[in-house]
Image (cartoon, grey):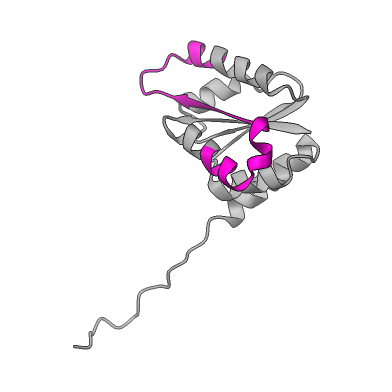
């Protein structure tokens, strides 16, 4: 069984945790979040993230971040070295729900499911505008 840590710019991580709890209430104890304030010091945030990892009490943890080359991604990179911890950037709600749906699978499978959910969650819902620019009254 795996745990999930969401690290994102404030207040996105907490908001995503709330979305996770809304749909997967029974898994809320396996999800933690860390909001990164605009003035955050990466070393301090990394210490908080390590504490959250330990509080999840899981052998494997998937860490989801919003942006890879900003403070959340940099904080998460400091966690990617322990065995059983994997980090993915580009978190979105379809990715999150997919992870929660398969949270009991091994970490490698969970990573694949997360990436698939993220990719399939990006779709165009509107149609292309009409080719004609004439309008009807």
Which residue is pictured at 60% across the width and 52% down the height?
A: 119
Q: Residue 99 location, x and y as percent? A: 67, 43
| Horizontal arrangement in the rendering, residue 89 relative to residue 110 (left or right) | left
Q: Residue 5 location, x and y as percent? A: 61, 29
Which residue is pictured at 79% across the width and 33% down the height?
A: 1
Kindly indicate the quadrant of the structure image that contains residue 80: top right
Q: Is 90 located above or below residue 9 in the figure?
A: below
Residue furthest toward the front? 26
| Horizontal arrangement in the rendering, residue 39 relative to residue 4 (left or right) | left
Residue furthest toward the bottom? 136
Q: Magenta region: which residues?
A: 18-46
Q: In this view of the protein, which residue sits in the foreground, 124 or 30?
A: 30
Which residue is pictured at 49% across the width and 11% down the height?
A: 44
Report if residue 43 lies within the magenta region.
Answer: yes
| Horizontal arrangement in the rendering, residue 75 relative to residue 98 (left or right) | left
Q: Is 104 located above or below residue 60 in the figure?
A: below
Which residue is pictured at 66% across the width and 19% down the height?
A: 55
Q: Is 44 located above or below residue 94 in the figure?
A: above
Report if residue 78 lies within the magenta region.
Answer: no
Q: In this view of the protein, which residue sits in the foreground, 109 or 56?
A: 56
What is the quadrant of the C terminus in the image? Answer: bottom left
Q: Residue 30 location, x and y as percent? A: 68, 31
Q: Residue 134 location, x and y as percent? A: 23, 85
């Amino acid at each position: 069984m795996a745990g999930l840590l969401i690290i994102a710019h404030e207040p996105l991580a907490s908001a995503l945790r709330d979305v996770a709890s809304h749909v997967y209430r029974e898994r809320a104890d396996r999800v933690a979040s860390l909001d990164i304030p605009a003035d955050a010091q990466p070393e301090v945030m990394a210490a908080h993230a390590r504490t959250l990892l330990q509080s999840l009490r899981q052998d494997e943890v998937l860490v989801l971040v919003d942006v890879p080359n900003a403070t959340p991604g940099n904080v998460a990179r400091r966690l990617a070295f322990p065995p059983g911890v994997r980090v993915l950037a580009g978190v979105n709600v379809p990715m999150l729900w997919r992870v929660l749906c398969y949270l009991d699978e091994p970490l490698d499978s969970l990573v694949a499911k997360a990436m698939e959910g993220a990719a399939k969650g990006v779709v165009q819902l509107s149609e292309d505008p009409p080719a004609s620019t004439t309008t009807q009254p």
